[in-house]
Every structure is written in C-alpha cells, then in structure tokens.
Amino acid sequence: TSLGFILVIVIPASLGFILSLVQTGLQMIDALKDVKYDIFIALPSPLLMVTLGVLGIMLWSGMTEECDAFYATNHGLLLVIFHLQVVIMIISSVFGSITLFGMGMALYADLTKKSDYEAPGDESGTKSA
C-alpha cells in the first residue's frame, strides 16, 4: 500500500508537470501550428485525470482495515493527504470525463460535417473561352 500512496500523491503532480512541458514544447514547433486535429495534443491530460481518479478509487476501496489503522497511527498526515488527493482526483476525473466527451463530440462533428471543398473542374460562374 506504500506504493499506492506514492501512486496517488506523487505521480499526478509529476506527470502533470511533464505533460505541461510536452504540450508547451509541441506548441513551440512551427510545423504543428496548423495541425487540424490538435485535439490529440490535448488528449493526454484529461485521459490521465480519469485514469488516476479510477486508480485512486480502486486503491482506497482496496485498503484493508489493518492498513488504514497502521497509517492512521504511524503516518496520520500521510493518510489524510492520501484521502484528500483521492477526492481531488475523483473531482478532476469527472471534469476529465466531461472534457473527453466534449473532445469526442467536437471531433465527431468535425469529421461528419459537409465540406466546402469544390472539385478543380467544378468552378461555376467562370466561362472558358
């Protein structure tokens, strides 16, 4: 269960920092400025929040009474931080799910909309001589 505490407390902060560095680096690349589907660049953050929220729920629900009692007596502050972090991750996973749903709907709408593309030989209004 010590690994579970590290998973819930340390990993969200460090991965969030690393993801923000990667996203900043990708935004600095000129070739990616005109990428049509930048949704895939923004996808890892909400996906990570949902995953960590689910893992936090699984860790908390799998904690035995002996484990809870041990951490409560010996490392009380760590247990409180663990519980707070799991609650925060649950809240962020709800918003991450909403974000993923919105991204999926935006991608679906973009892929299914009628295009304004005209074929090269299909120019109306111009007369050829």
Image: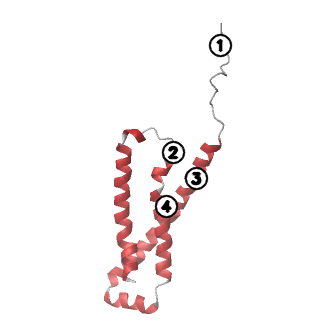
Few, some or many C-alpha atoms within 10 Å of disc 4 (few <14, some 14-19, many ≥20)? some
Of residues 80 and 115, the one nearer the viewer is 115
Q: Which mark is residue 37?
A: 2
Q: Are marks 1 and 4 in contact (CB under 8 Å)?
A: no
Report the mark closest to the observer, 2 or 4.
2
CA neighbours of label 1 inside 10 A, class few (<14), some (14 to 19), many (20+)? few
Label whose residue precedes the other's in the sequence (1 or 4): 4
Q: Residue at x 48, y 46 (%)?
A: 38
Comes first in the chain, label 2 or label 1: 2
Residue position for label 3:
104
Q: Earlier in the sequence, mark 3 or mark 4?
A: 4
Q: Position of residue 108 (x, y in %)?
A: 62, 48
User: Could you tell me which secondary element the residue under label 4 belongs to?
Assistant: helix
Assign the N terminus to one quadrant of the image: bottom left
Disc 4 designates what residue?
Answer: 47
The residue drawn where x is 54% and y is 57% is: 100
Q: Position of residue 96 (x, y in %)?
A: 50, 60
Dot 4 amino acid type: Leu
Mark 2 → mark 4, Cα distance in angstroms: 17 Å
Q: Earlier in the sequence, mark 3 or mark 1?
A: 3
Q: Earlier in the sequence, mark 2 or mark 4?
A: 2
The amino acid marked with disc number 1 is Thr
Cα gap from disc 2 to disc 1, whole angstroms: 34 Å
* Badge 3 density bin: few <14, some 14–19, many ≥20, Cα 10 Å: few
Which residue is the site of mark 1?
126
